[in-house]
Image (spheres, rainbow, N blue to C red):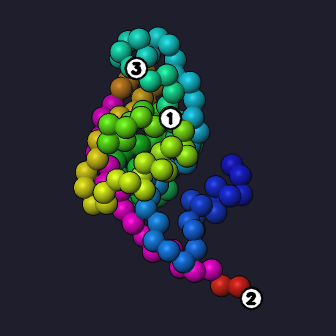
Amino acid sequence: MSKFWRHFLSDGCSGRVQRCLGLYGRGITLNGKVRQHYDLEQNRGLIVQLITPEGPAEQAGLFEGDILLTLADHPALNLTGLHDLIIELPVGIPLRITFLRGSRLLERWAILNDWAVPASRKP
């Protein structure tokens, strides 16, 4: 994982309020058999590589290795697109997420939150 993403997950952007789902991942191409079995229109998902402890993703029951398909009925195709979506979604309201765990299609509810990120001190 790059230094940027380690910082983003642990500290966010300095001096502002940051909205979060509490996960890090990368876009992947979905297995054709799984797509066909569940009649999925999208051919990509976001494999979860890291979960922030006690964050919304962990509280919703996501694990590392799960493949996030949708958040609030919007496709999760890559991390940048997911971040752009999270900025637009409401905080404090349950949002449906769908994901693959192995060959099982699961659905849970996640509640996005905001947290204040302190401004960094410069020596």
The Cα–Cα distance between marks 1 and 2, rounded to whole angstroms, is 40 Å
Residue lying farthest to the right in this orientation: 123
Pointer 2: what residue? 123
Residue stretch in magenta: 106-120
Residue type, numbered disc 2: Pro
Where 101 falls versus 24 (above or below)? above
The Cα–Cα distance between marks 2 and 3, rounded to whole angstroms, is 52 Å
Element at badge 2? Answer: loop
Which disc number belongs to residue 53?
none
Where 106 falls versus 56 (above or below)? above
- Does the magenta stretch mainly form a helix, a strand or a loop? strand
Q: Residue at x 57, y 68 (%)?
A: 13
Residue type, numbered disc 3: Glu
Which of the two labelled residues, at mark 1 and mark 3, occupies the earlier sequence position? 3
**Residue 66 in view, yes or no:** no
Residue type, numbered disc 1: Leu
Pointer 1: what residue? 77
Pointer 3: what residue? 41
Relative horizontal placement of residue 74, taking residue 32 as reference (left or right): left
